[in-house]
Structure formats: C-alpha cells, structure tokens
Amino acid sequence: MSTDRTRPAGRRDSSRPGTVPLQRPRRALRPHQWFAERLLAVLSGQRPVHWMLGHTIGEAYDQLAELAPGAPLGAGSRRPVVRACRGSQPATGVVEAFASISTGEQVRAMAFRLEQGPDLRWRCAAIDLGGERLPAVR
C-alpha cells in the first residue's frame, strides 16, 4: 500500500500525526483560594486596595486600607506566592481560611473569614496577618 493513498490530500510529508496528550481541565479555585490570591495582591502592593471594593464587608475593607500602604506581604524584588491555603466551614455560609505566603525564604501567615451573602456571593469579613493582630469583626 502506497503512503500517497493513506495521507490526506495536500499533505506532503510521510509521517503520521502523533497523539495529542490529554490535558487536565483546570480546576476552578475554591472561594478561599481565590480570596487568598486577591488579598495577597493587595497586601503585597501589586494591586490597589479599591480592587477589593465589593469583595469585602464590615471592617475588612478598613483593615485592608490600614495594612496595604505598608505592603506587609511584599518583600523587595521577589514576588510573594500563596504556598498553601486551607479553609473550614464552621457554619453554613461561612468559611474560615488560612494561607501561608512565601517570599523567597520568608513565610508569613494570613487568616481571613468569608461570609456568603443572600446573593450567594462570598465576601471577606475579616483579615489577620500572623504577628499583626487586628480587631475581630462581628
């Protein structure tokens, strides 16, 4: 059998197409993971505080506005990353989460609380950085 008869019209090479590797679909971030990334962006100076308007409730925005100018999670030329993020659901519509943030050799802790509103959107209600105690929001 000639290779001319088995290849598609217009194809000039004699090789057969390879297999396409299976790609895993990207898993959507869970709410606490999504918020950890956003909070890190603000607290490292990569994004302005107003980027979180509409994503915070109560005093959480004020906490961000107070913390952000000092970029407490930013450290020089290295970009901080969320190393791990875990959350627990102590009540329906509430997630309490923590994340470890690494910048080179330095690792910091960040805790936050999310509350789900009647519109089913999650909003940050409180933020706490390891070593920098902030007042609890109720």
Image: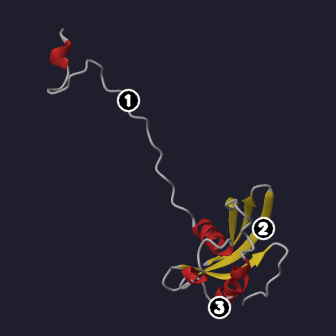
Pointer 2 or 3: first along the chain: 3
| Residue closest to the eye, 134 or 136 | 134
Q: In this picture, is 60 found above or below 45?
A: below
Specify which label sits upstream in the sequence, 2 or 1: 1
Report helix, strand or loop for mark 1: loop
Residue 19 shows which numbered tag? 1
Label 3 amino acid? Gly
For residue 6, which quarter of the picture? top left
**Quadrant housing the C terminus:** bottom right
Please state which of residues 75 and 67 is positioned toward the viewer in this rendering.
Answer: 75
Q: Secondary structure at mark 3?
A: loop
| Residue 42 sits in quarter | bottom right
Mark sitting on residue 58: 3
Q: Earlier in the sequence, mark 1 or mark 3?
A: 1
| Residue 78 on image: x %, y % | 70, 59
Q: Residue at x 68, y 74 (%)?
A: 43
Give yes or no for contact between labels 2 and 1 (Cβ–Cβ under 8 Å): no
Residue at left offset 61%, top offset 82%: 49
Q: Cα distance, mark 2 to mark 1?
A: 44 Å
Would residue 7 appear left or right of 75 to someone viewing this image? left
Proximity of marks 2 and 3: CB atoms separated by less than 8 Å:
no
The residue carrying mark 2 is: 109
Callout 1–callout 3 Cβ contact below 8 Å:
no
